[in-house]
Image (cartoon, rainbow, N blue to C red):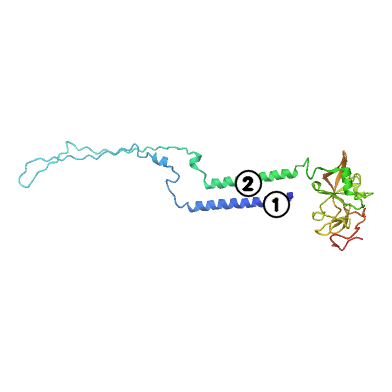
Amino acid sequence: MSFGNLVLVGVALFAILGAVGAFTIAFRRSQSDESADVVDPTAGVSSETLKADKSMVGVRVEPIPVPVIEETGEETGDEVEVEVEVGVAEPEPSPVAIQVVETQRVVEVSPEEAGVTRRQFFNRALNVTFFSFLGIMGINSLAFFWPRLSGGFGSDIDAGSLAEVKSAVFTPTGSILPLFIPEAKAYVVPAPTSLSDQYAGKQVETDGLMALFQRCVHLGCRVPWCAPSQGFECPCHGSKYNSVGEYFAGPAPRNLDRFVVEVRDGRFIIKTGSVIQTSRAPALSVNYPQGPSCIGATSGDEEA
């Protein structure tokens, strides 16, 4: 996946996360508005606080004095004389003293007892998702820009000993059979006796061998070898190249790309980190086609 595709995927994920976050905030606000009309004065007060309520502590209520009634006199017939004696002077009632003592008790609640609210859960989940996305993007960016110092495509690939490579490429019949190196994504082919001026000073040939990139320069399809025509023919859109990768026909804009090569300690080395691009050759260095095509004529502008 190219860097541009990674950026597009990242932007799409970021937009989705933003939409989810906006929906969550809107939903929480709507829930808060619906419950705003109902107000519970004891909402949020713990049971320990309610039990510790001492608002009536220190309140003293004086009892109301009750008058004493004494019965005196003699009973004469049906009449009874009642004398009410309250004392020498009836005391005035003292005012009731009420003392209000306000107390405040702070009870610390552990996180285990308090738990996690729904808002906290969504906020934390959104933060974890966002920063995980940033971390993945950062790792992918570093992996994309970090050079591969050893092993794999982009490094120096050992295609084998020079003698073995030559014996595989040059057949006893005199025909060409390119040697495909999967790790280098390259075809090793014989170089022409005289190189075109396009390749001067670019180190694309050594000991009569060249290494061609397997990818078609039109849209990136893998270009297979066609033995009858002794050239490379792309099955996707019909681009054709001769045995040394020079453009012959089709929509391809230039020759096949090739790699810098060298012989090191008797080993044929393909430098896949150095890709050489050249325009269409003014004249073919190798005759093509030498036989029937594998995909047929797909372009009306083929050169004879």
In x, y percent, where is residue 76? 5, 44
Report if the CB atoms under discs 1 and 2 are less than 8 Å apart: no
Q: Give whichever of discs 1 and 2 has the lower sequence position.
A: 1
Report x, y in % for residue 17: 62, 50
Question: Mark 2 falls on what kind of element?
Answer: helix
Task: Identify which residue, 264 or 217, lies in the foreground.
Answer: 264
Amino acid carrying label 1: it is Leu
Q: What is the C-alpha distance between the residues marked 1 and 2?
A: 16 Å
- The residue located at (57%, 46%) in the rendering is 123
Q: Residue at x 58, y 53 (%)?
A: 23
**From this viewpoint, which residue is outermost toward the right?**
194
Residue picked out by circle 2: 130
**In the figure, is residue 128 to the left or right of 90?**
right
Residue 203 in which image quadrant: top right
- Label 1 belongs to which residue? 8
Residue type of the residue flagged with mark 2? Phe
Q: Label 2: how many residues lie within 10 Å, few (<14), some (14-19) or many (20+)? A: some
